[in-house]
Image (cartoon, rainbow, N blue to C red):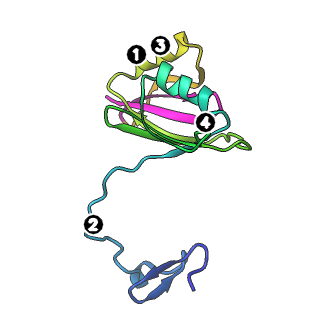
Amino acid sequence: MVQRGQRRGKKGVLGTGDSAAARVDWRIDVTFGRMAPTVPVTDMERALRFYVDVLGMTKTFENGNPVGFVILKKDAAELHLTLAKAHQATDRNVAHLLVDDATKLYDHLVEQGARIVKGVRDADYGLRQFVFADPDGNRIDVGQRL
């Protein structure tokens, strides 16, 4: 049985403390496609007003009555919202969004009254970035390649 912090390999289970010499090559010849974060929200209508009306995303799918799950898209970005009435935000980012103009999006969000967690800055690793929070406090890190 694989325990927390361990991985199952071709030759059995490897723990996190195993030596590099004993590790199995974990690369796998599988092409990964889209990966979309699922963000919990306490009020789906309020969340949709923010993501659709403020960020300009489009709802492409919804499920439930009342709606408890939504897929949103804008350009190459996709985000899933799930209704979680007891959700409490943390101090961690739930998603990273790459854009072509971080300053323009930052200015738009400020104009719309969105909560900015970290202001725009140019990082030494080649990104112009900032962090904002949605109405439920979910933090999204925005980056633009410089």
Which residue in the structure is indicated by mark 3?
107
Q: Going 62% across and 26% down the picture, which residue do you hit?
A: 46
Query: Which amino acid type is shown beneath numbered disc 4?
Result: Asn
Q: Is residue 49 left or right of residue 123?
A: right
* Position in image of residue 77 (x %, y %): 37, 37
**In this rendering, the label closer to the viewer, 4 or 1:** 4
Quadrant where the C terminus sits is top left
Q: Mark 2 and mark 3: span between their CA atoms? A: 40 Å
Q: Which residue is at a point 53% across and 10% down the rendered structure image?
A: 111
Earlier-in-chain disc, 3 versus 4: 3
Instruction: Please give the residue where the numbered disc 4 appears in the rendered image.
Output: 138
Chain-order first, disc 4 or disc 1 = 1
Is residue 39 positioned above or below 136 on the image?
A: below
Residue 126 % position (x, y): 35, 34
Q: Circle 3: is it few (<14), some (14-19), or many (20+) Cα within 10 Å?
A: few
Amino acid at dot 2: Val
Q: Is residue 12 left or right of residue 116?
A: left
Task: State the image coordinates of residue 71 (x, y, percent, origin top left).
Answer: 45, 40
Q: Earlier in the sequence, mark 2 or mark 3?
A: 2
Q: In the image shown, does 104 or 61 lie closer to the viewer?
A: 61
Residue at 30 percent across and 71 percent down: it is 28
**Spatial distance from mark 1 to mark 3, Cα to Cα?**
5 Å
Alpha-carbon distance for marks 2 and 4?
31 Å
Depth check: give the residue in front, 29 or 82. Answer: 82
Q: Amino acid at mark 1?
A: Lys
In this view, the residue farthest toward the bottom is: 11
Which picture quadrant has residue 144? top left
Query: Which quarter of the picture shows residue 24?
Result: bottom left
Question: Secondary structure under badge 1?
Answer: helix
**Magenta extent:** 126-146
List the residue tagged with mark 1. 104
